[in-house]
Image (tube, helix red, strand yellow):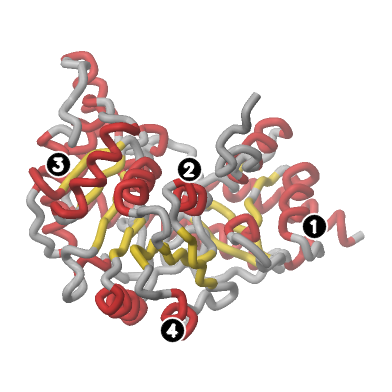
C-alpha cells in the first residue's frame, strides 16, 4: 500500500483522550480533559430540544442560521464595541476546532510562515503543516508565562502570514495583557500579517478583569479572525458549536474551507445557542463567579498539599509544579497519579513542540465541588502514603 499522509500518520492520540481513557479505565477522577461535569443552562438545552422537535432538521444555510449570526454580531457589539455585519462577517462552524482549521486552510498558502505561541493547543501545528505553512514557535514558560518582545519580533518576517494566539490561554490560564496584544498588533501591521485569535474562553476571565480581543485594537479590525465557542460559554462542550467573526476579505476564503470541511452545523443547536447569547449580564457574571470559586477551591486544596499553584487569570485550568508528587517528569507524574491516586491530570510538557518544561501539571477545575474535594482527598492520601 502506498504511504498515507505523513502529517497525520503516526501522530500520537491527543493527550486529552489518552488521560481521559486512562481515567475511565482506572475509575480515576478526570481533572485532565477540559470539560465540565454538569450540563449548561436548562433553558438553552430546552430550546434545542424544542427546535429539534419542531424542525426543520434539514441543512441550514452554509454560513449558519441568521438568528445565531445576528446574536454573534450583537454580542461583539455588547462586550467589545465592535460593529459587525452579520451577513458578511459572521459564520457558524461545528466547533472552534473546525473554525481554526477553516481559518488556517483558508488563509495559509504553502511556504507562508505562521507564528505560534507555545504552549499550544495540539491541533494548531498539524493543521498549519497540512496547509503547507511553516511554523515559527515562540515560547512562554512557567512559572511566569512572560512573552519576550525580542523573541516575538524575531519570529516575524516578510513571509509571516499569521500569528495564532489563544487568549485566555490553555493550558497556562494566562490572559494576554493589552500591552502584549498591542505588541502583536504592531508586528502584524509592520509585516502585513493577520491574527487568528482563539478566544474560546473569552467569557471566563477572573478577578474583575475583562477580556480584550485583538480585534478591538487600532488598525486591527480587518486583520483579525475572531473565534468563539458556545461549548465553553454555556458548558455544553459536546455540542461543538463555534463561530467566526472576520472582515469580508478574510471570511471569503475561510467560508470556502468550511464549505468543504463540514458545510453546516445542526440547526437545533444553532437556535439554542442564539437564545443563550441573548442572556442578560446576570448569566455571564454568574458563570464567571462560579468558575472563579472553583478555581480558588482547587487551588487552595492543592496548595495545602504542597503544590505550587501558578496564578490563573482565566480558562478552566490551573497549573502546578509536580511538588509533593516528587517526580521530576510531569508525564510520568500524571500517569502515576491516575493509576495510583485515582486523579487524572495533563502534563504541561504535552503542549510544547520541543524541549518542554518537565515539572508542571495542568488540572481542570470545571467540576462539581464534591468532585474537586474528593480529588484533593485522594491526592492527600496518596502523597501521605508516598512519604512513609
Residue 328 got which mark?
Answer: none
State the CA–CA distance, disc 1 to disc 3.
50 Å
Say which of marks 4 and 1 sits in front. 4
Q: Are marks 4 and 1 in contact (CB under 8 Å)?
A: no
Check disc 1 and report the residue beneath it.
383
Residue at 40 percent of width and 44 percent of height: 97
| Along the line of sight, the residue nearer the viewer: 248 or 216 | 248
In the image, residue 60 above or below residue 185: above
**Is mark 4 in CB contact (under 8 Å) with mark 2?**
no
Q: CA distance from mark 4 to mark 1?
A: 40 Å
Relative placement, left or right, of 361 versus 139 is right
The residue nearer to you, when weighing 296 against 363, is 363
Lower sequence index among marks 1 and 3: 3
Residue 79: x %, y % from top left: 18, 60
Q: Nearer the viewer, residue 335 or 340?
A: 335
In terms of secondary structure, where does tag 1 sit?
helix
Amino acid at each position: 500500500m502506498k504511504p498515507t499522509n505523513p502529517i497525520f500518520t503516526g501522530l500520537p492520540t491527543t493527550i486529552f483522550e489518552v488521560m481521559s481513557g486512562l481515567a475511565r479505565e482506572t475509575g480515576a477522577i478526570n481533572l485532565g480533559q477540559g470539560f465540565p461535569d454538569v450540563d449548561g443552562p436548562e433553558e438553552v438545552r430546552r430550546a434545542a430540544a424544542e427546535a429539534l422537535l419542531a424542525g426543520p432538521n434539514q441543512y441550514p444555510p452554509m454560513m449558519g442560521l441568521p438568528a445565531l449570526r445576528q446574536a454573534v454580531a450583537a454580542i461583539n457589539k455588547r462586550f467589545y464595541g465592535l460593529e459587525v455585519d452579520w451577513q458578511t462577517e459572521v459564520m457558524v462552524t461545528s466547533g472552534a476546532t473546525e473554525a481554526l482549521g477553516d481559518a488556517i486552510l483558508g488563509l495559509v498558502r504553502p511556504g507562508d510562515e505562521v507564528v505560534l505561541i507555545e504552549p499550544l493547543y495540539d491541533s494548531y501545528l498539524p493543521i498549519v503543516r497540512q496547509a503547507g505553512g511553516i511554523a515559527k514557535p515562540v515560547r512562554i514558560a512557567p512559572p511566569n508565562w512572560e512573552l519576550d518582545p525580542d523573541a516575538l519580533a524575531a519570529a516575524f518576517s516578510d513571509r509571516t502570514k499569521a500569528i495564532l494566539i489563544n487568549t485566555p490561554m490553555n493550558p497556562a490560564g494566562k490572559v494576554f495583557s493589552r500591552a502584549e496584544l498591542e505588541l502583536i498588533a504592531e508586528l502584524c501591521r509592520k509585516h502585513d500579517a493577520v491574527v487568528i485569535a482563539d478566544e474560546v474562553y473569552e467569557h471566563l476571565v477572573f478577578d474583575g478583569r475583562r477580556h480584550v480581543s485583538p480585534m478591538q485594537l487600532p488598525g486591527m479590525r480587518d486583520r483579525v479572525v475572531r473565534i468563539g465557542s458556545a461549548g465553553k460559554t454555556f458548558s455544553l462542550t459536546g455540542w461543538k458549536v463555534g463561530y467566526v467573526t472576520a472582515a469580508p476579505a478574510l471570511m471569503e476564503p475561510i467560508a470556502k474551507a468550511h464549505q468543504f470541511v463540514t458545510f453546516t452545523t445542526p440547526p437545533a443547536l444553532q437556535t439554542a445557542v442564539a437564545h443563550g447569547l441573548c442572556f442578560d449580564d446576570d448569566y455571564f457574571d454568574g458563570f464567571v463567579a462560579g468558575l472563579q470559586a472553583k478555581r480558588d477551591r482547587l487551588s487552595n486544596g492543592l496548595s495545602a498539599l504542597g503544590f505550587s499553584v501558578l496564578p490563573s487569570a482565566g480558562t478552566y485550568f490551573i497549573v502546578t509544579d509536580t511538588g509533593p508528587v516528587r517526580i521530576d517528569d510531569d508525564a510520568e507524574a500524571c500517569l502515576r497519579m491516575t493509576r495510583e491516586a485515582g486523579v487524572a491530570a495533563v502534563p504541561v510538557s504535552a503542549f510544547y513542540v520541543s524541549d518542554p518544561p518537565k515539572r508542571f501539571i495542568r488540572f481542570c477545575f470545571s467540576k462539581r465541588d464534591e468532585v474537586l474535594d474528593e480529588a484533593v482527598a485522594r491526592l492527600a492520601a496518596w502523597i501521605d502514603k508516598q512519604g512513609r
